[in-house]
């Protein structure tokens, strides 16, 4: 029984020290890719997910920040869907609560996304508040 050669490279070790300028730039792109929600409806999750999937094996800092951005945007998607379902099951009356909550969630999403992008560009591993860690 022969074993095929292992051409798969091992993942890079966790980042130590300061990330390179290229890593910082790609990490910033991972956060800012969420703003593609204005172009496509699913862009908030798809944008960070795509950047993370492309660069996760090459750049440990991008791997970390891409997961963080994807987790945060998945959390925001879950919150928005839950508020819409709440409005639907209350026959629209829940909109009195859901619409202001959606506006607060949107402003928070926008502010935290911009802060995360700026921190990533500085080389700081940013952690979003109130984010579910769905992807580890």
Image (tube, grey):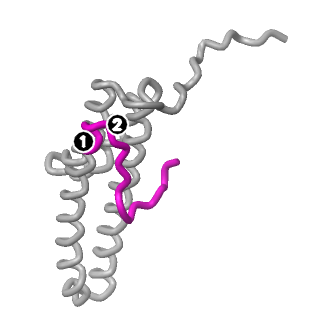
**Mark closer to the observer (1, 2):** 1
Residue bearing the label numbered 2: 50
Q: Distance between the residues labelled 1 and 2?
A: 9 Å
Q: Is residue 43 above or below residue 9?
A: below
Q: Which sits in the foreground, 71 or 27?
A: 27
Q: How crowded is mark 1: few (under 14 residues within 10 Å), some or many (20 or more)?
A: many
Which mark is on residue 33? 1
**Which residue is painted at 60% across and 12% down in the image?**
7
Q: In which quarter of the image is residue 111?
A: bottom left
Which mark is first along the chain, 2 or 1?
1
| Horizontal and vertical percent position of residue 67 | 42, 44
| Horizontal and vertical percent position of residue 79 | 34, 68
**Which residue is painted at 24% across and 68% down in the image?**
105
Mark 2: secondary structure: helix
Q: How crowded is mark 2: few (under 14 residues within 10 Å), some or many (20 or more)?
A: some
Q: Main secondary structure of the magenta part?
A: loop
**Which residue is painted at 31% across and 37% down in the image?**
123
Which mark is on residue 100? none
Farthest residue, direction right: 1
**Which residue is painted at 18% across and 78% down in the image?**
99
Farthest residue, direction left: 38
Residue 132 within the segment the image draws in magenta: yes
Left/right of residue 16 with respect to residue 115 in the rendered view:
right
Q: Give the range drawn in magenta.
A: 119-136
């Amino acid at each position: 029984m022969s074993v095929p050669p292992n051409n798969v490279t091992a993942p890079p070790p966790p980042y130590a020290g300061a990330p390179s300028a290229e890593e910082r730039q790609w990490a910033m792109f991972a956060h800012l890719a969420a703003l593609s929600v204005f172009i496509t409806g699913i862009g908030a999750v798809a944008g960070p997910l795509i950047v993370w999937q492309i660069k996760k094996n090459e750049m440990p800092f991008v791997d970390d920040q891409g997961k963080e951005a994807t987790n945060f945007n998945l959390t925001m998607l879950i919150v928005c869907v839950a508020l819409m379902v709440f409005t639907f099951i209350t026959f629209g009356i829940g909109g009195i609560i859901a619409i202001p909550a959606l506006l607060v969630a949107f402003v928070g999403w926008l502010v935290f996304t911009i802060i995360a992008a700026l921190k990533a560009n500085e080389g700081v591993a940013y952690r979003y508040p109130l984010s579910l860690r769905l992807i580890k």
